[in-house]
Image (cartoon, rainbow, N blue to C red):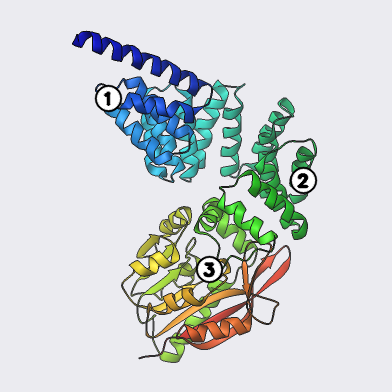
Amino acid sequence: MSGQVAGAEQAIAERLMARASQLLESRRPAEALPLLERLHHLAEVPARAREARAIALLAMGRFGDAADAADDALGVLPGCGALLQIRGRARLAMGRDIEAMDDAAAAVMADSADNDAKGLLAETLMKAGKPDEAIFLAWRVAEALPQDMTAQLRLAQAFITGGRHAAADELLAALQARAPLLALPIALRAQNKLLMKDATEAERLSRTALDRGMVEVSLHSVLAHALVAQSRLAEAGPHFRAAARLAPHDAYLAHLASASAGGTPDRATDAYVASVFDGYADRFEADLLGLGYRVPGLVRLAVDRWLAETGQASIPGPVLDLGCGTGLVGVALLGLTEAGLCGVDLSRNMIAQTRAKGIYTELHQAEFSTALANLHGRYALVAAADLFCYFGELGVALASAAAKLTDAGLMMFSVELSPEASGWQLGDSGRYRHSLAYVTATVRQAGLTALSIAPETIRQNAGMPVEGLFVIARRLAC
């Protein structure tokens, strides 16, 4: 009798597995998953059911669950290249880039002829800031699969990541000619043109595709950015909003859409800021220096004056650099920070750039308020260069930062200057601007005494100066 029961269970399991496989092939993972969950609770779960469950979860965007499911399946099939790829893709989507790279490399080692594994490894290398290695692998895959559009687009993306824009444009032009009705090659080519500082051509490419009826979030996004680059902010707004509607879970586009529509959230979301700077880290310094970015230099000048007035050779205590980016403030303060230099930034790619400089004694990838809550020391100097352009309401942020100062410690920060007489505004660019009256009052409310609130040109944008305020404030001894 027990043999009959076992046979019946096996027959049911085979039917469930067959139906789930059909649904996955039809790209209906949400329908396949309940069947696979039933299989998962059998006494002896078939190995292919474990793998199919991981595939379904990955396709549904449940990346943490997909990684766990792949772990479970790897316990039964250790070293399986397909499962390593599933886990690697899930980890890559979660921002666990190093672990994803390890999985992809292990998948390639499991089967050196597997082009999917090599393609995944190329993607993880791009994320890890290793463009030359990514180009080599992506080239090999594209060469092996000349008709595979995904492989060709991956190679183009690798060229772009590595700054080989002419090569990317040549490849993308060929792909566009091969598949003129496909939106992604056109959108990627337009993005590449924008990175080449050719906003006019980026606009033409994306607008032409949209006029042909192509519906693609990246076309609207690139067109909006191309218009912003030409200082045509009012025209960019509808395209930011269209892109946000097409990608409702994209925090980056949601913030820019809100800004262009006159929305007034009191700060940019963490997801927006992380998205901006994770994608910008590789070219951040070159772009800022090209725009004449002055805030780190202003911090250095202010510190030099402070030390000259007090007769000290170095800053009398540790330094906290909030929104440290790629470490430009740390570079500016070289030789003056003997008591330690702590950097905080939300972007993992920015932190990686900063770590490579080797000048910070401590680095934390964390959101502003979380970082301040977890830092238990006091700092002689707290710097926030170009951080508060992502905050509207500054009261809580300034008070939290001021609480980390030693008695008589200094805080230095910049804001972009609002043309209004009071308050703060969210500009079309997605950055906040603050009035002199608002900054003055908020500094005082944070328990700081303003030593200087000086008008300064922060940087250039589209050939025009971006006017701001550079603030030096002191926490008085209790």
The picture places residue 4, in percent across and down from the top left corner, at 24, 8
Count residues near mark 2 (Cα–Cα under 10 Å), then give few for <14, some for 14-19, many for 20+: some
User: Gap in Å between the C-alphas at discs 3 and 2?
Assistant: 32 Å
Q: Which residue is mark 1?
A: 76
Element under disc 2? helix
Looking at the picture, which amino acid does disc 2 mark? Answer: Glu
Left or right: where does residue 77 sit relative to residue 433?
left
Looking at the picture, which amino acid does disc 1 mark? Answer: Val
Q: Nearer the viewer, mark 2 or mark 1?
A: 1
In this orientation, which residue lies closer to the viewer: 250 or 382? 250
Q: Which residue is mark 2?
A: 201
Residues tagged 1 and 3 counted as in contact (Cβ below 8 A)? no
Count residues near mark 1 (Cα–Cα under 10 Å), then give few for <14, some for 14-19, many for 20+: few
The image's mark for residue 472 is: none
Give the residue drawn at x 42%, y 79%.
402
Give the residue drawn at x 51%, y 55%.
271
Picture quarter with the N terminus: top left
Count residues near mark 3 (Cα–Cα under 10 Å), then give few for <14, some for 14-19, many for 20+: some
Tell me if residue 302 comes above or below residue 359 in the rendering: below
Looking at the picture, which amino acid does disc 3 mark? Answer: Leu
User: Gap in Å between the C-alphas at discs 1 and 3?
Assistant: 48 Å
User: Gap in Å between the C-alphas at discs 2 and 1?
Assistant: 53 Å
**Residue 467 in view, yes or no:** yes
Element under disc 3? loop
Extreme residue toward the left, this view: 2
Q: Earlier in the sequence, mark 2 or mark 1?
A: 1
In this orientation, which residue lies closer to the viewer: 289 or 75? 75
